[in-house]
Image (cartoon, rainbow, N blue to C red):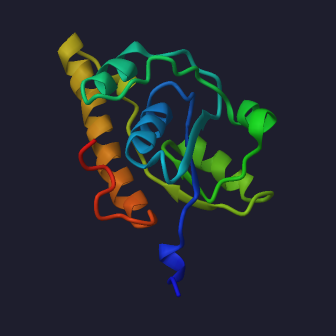
Amino acid sequence: MDEPRSKRIHSVLFVCAMNAVRSPMAEAIARHYFGKSIYVQSAGVRKGEPDGFMAAILSEIGIDASRHKPRTLEELEEWEGLNFDLIISLSPEAHHAALELTRTIAAEVEYWPTPDPTITQGSREQVLDAYRNIRDGLAYRIRLRLKQSSPKSANDGEGA
């Protein structure tokens, strides 16, 4: 019998403010490592514009996010509903929206405060480094969190 906190996660939704950087980055990383065993989506509280830096820093680690189109929670709900086991919010605004969703859906909500790299000032390389820091931090947390609920976690995310 599984303990409650190690409950198997079948679907996860990442939410941030505009679904342009943090949540699509998390979605792409989670799909890369766990896409065969966990259904993954992302959405924003508000509609954003595609972000080229997000796709560029993911391509550095072999993940293609170039086709990502930002979408809102409302759009996602209209297209397929919001039936997720786990909602991970990455910004204060998204966390508030995620908690509101739990009034109508039974989902676990986790808040992972994640800085917005788009506000970084400086050279192109300094900005890209800010995006890389977010990417690497999310990759670490996603692998740690979702590995616990994968059926065979020993090799998830390794190789291939």
Report the number of discs: 0
Residue at position x 45%, y 66% in the image: 151
Q: Position of residue 142 (x, y in %)?
A: 38, 51
Residue at position x 42%, y 48% in the image: 113
Residue at position x 31%, y 23% in the image: 59
- As drawn, the residue found furthest toward the bottom would be 1
Nearest the eye: 3 or 130 = 3
Residue at position x 58%, y 49% in the image: 95
Nearest the eye: 59 or 133 = 59
Which of the 4 quarters of the picture holds residue 44? top right
Q: Position of residue 152 (x, y in %)?
A: 39, 65
Q: Position of residue 17 (x, y in %)?
A: 56, 33
Quadrant including the C terminus: top left
Nearest the eye: 93 or 4 = 4
Q: Position of residue 76 (x, y in %)?
A: 71, 35
Q: Is residue 26 above or below residue 144?
A: above
Q: Is residue 67 above or below residue 91?
A: above
Q: Is residue 8 above or below residue 54?
A: below
Q: Judge left or right: residue 94 versus residue 136.
A: right
